[in-house]
């Protein structure tokens, strides 16, 4: 009888050890991906508050009839298409852990988290009238970390915005912008620029740069200027468009403003 009790105890003890070991390994693996899945949100020092540029985040064009507002769009931050399915699953797991952690601490979850990898995609989803499903109506590629600061960038922010050339500034980039044909001229691009500006600001970027190619018509350049961008000819070389072969370079200060009706889903 004693041996039988001892055998049962041993079996239970071994089972508990195995269960504890598996739980430890699982928690360890989750912790690693929790820390490594997303870029940290960067602090925004007081000297980087860019209210001095006179932007309040409002876009009067968005008030015109037929324009889409933030309340009409579900924004989703996604990793680039080349990221593997397994990595995407880990990103979703990490995101849910962060949400759970925020809930347990009774804190608001971060406004947005960018997956590691230096680049991300912002998707615009819209639910047409009478439909129960959201459609992906636009995609915007952008960098998620400040790039290196070089003399052309310092000269540009000094000439356009009057900032000291010795000031260290962070600069993010918009890689591409694409809106599906039925939704063009509906304000989707302007709303996307606001969201990307917010994300860049959160990630420690003071300015957003891009290369605008409008085939010489000038209309696209005017549209970017209406949305706060300025021509930056000194950046042609460092942005990979020498002599304007891929378009003209432009720059705008970022704005850490979250429209009250804007919702960004990060997994």
Image: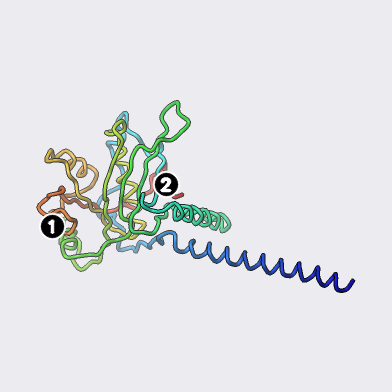
Residue at the image position 38 percent from the left and 44 percent from the top: 259
The numbered disc on residue 217 is none
Q: Residue furthest left?
A: 243
Q: Which mark is residue 234?
A: 1
Foreground residue, 236 or 191?
236
Nearer the observer, 184 or 203: 184
Binning the other alpha carbons within 10 Å of mark 1 as few (below 14), some (14 to 19) or many (20 upward) gives some
Q: Nearer the viewer, residue 247 or 170?
A: 247
Lateral position of residue 101 relative to residue 215, left or right: right
Picture quarter with the N terminus: bottom right
As drawn, is 237 to the left or to the right of 68? Answer: left
Q: Which residue is mark 2?
A: 264
Residue 129 point in image, percent of width and height: 42, 27
Vertical order, 130 against 214 (above or below):
above
Callout 2–callout 1 Cβ contact below 8 Å: no
**Element type at mark 2:** strand
Quick one: label 2 or label 1, which is nearer the N terminus?
A: 1
Q: Secondary structure at mark 1?
A: helix
- 34 or 192, which lies in front? 34
Depicted 212 relative to depicted 98: above or below = above
Residue 72, percent from left and from top: 40, 36
**x and y percent of residue 47 in the render?**
30, 63
Which residue is found at the position 51% from the left and 54% from the top? 93
Residue at coordinates 27% horizontally, 51% vertically from top-left?
174
């Amino acid at each position: 009888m004693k041996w039988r009790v001892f055998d049962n105890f041993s079996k239970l003890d071994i089972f508990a050890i195995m269960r504890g070991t598996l739980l430890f390994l699982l928690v360890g693996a989750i912790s690693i991906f929790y820390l490594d899945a997303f870029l940290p949100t960067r602090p925004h020092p007081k000297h980087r508050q860019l209210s001095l540029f006179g932007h309040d985040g409002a876009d009067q064009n968005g008030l015109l009839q037929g324009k889409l507002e933030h309340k009409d769009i579900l924004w989703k931050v996604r990793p680039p298409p080349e990221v593997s399915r397994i990595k995407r699953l880990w990103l979703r797991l990490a995101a849910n852990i962060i949400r759970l952690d925020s809930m347990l601490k009774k804190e608001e979850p971060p406004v947005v988290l960018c997956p590691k990898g230096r680049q991300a995609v912002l998707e615009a989803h819209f639910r047409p009238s009478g439909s129960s499903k959201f459609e992906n109506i636009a995609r915007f590629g952008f960098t998620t970390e400040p790039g290196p600061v070089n003399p052309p960038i310092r000269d540009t922010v000094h000439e356009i915005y009057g900032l000291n050339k010795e000031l260290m500034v962070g600069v993010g980039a918009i890689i591409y912008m694409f809106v599906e044909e039925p939704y063009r001229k509906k304000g989707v691009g302007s709303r996307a620029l606001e969201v990307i500006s917010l994300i860049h600001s959160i990630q420690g970027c003071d300015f957003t740069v891009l290369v605008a190619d409008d085939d010489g018509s000038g209309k696209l350049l005017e549209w970017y200027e209406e949305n706060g961008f300025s021509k930056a000819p000194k950046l042609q070389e460092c942005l990979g468009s020498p002599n304007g072969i891929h378009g003209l370079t432009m720059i705008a200060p970022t704005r850490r403003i979250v429209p009250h009706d804007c919702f960004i889903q990060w997994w």
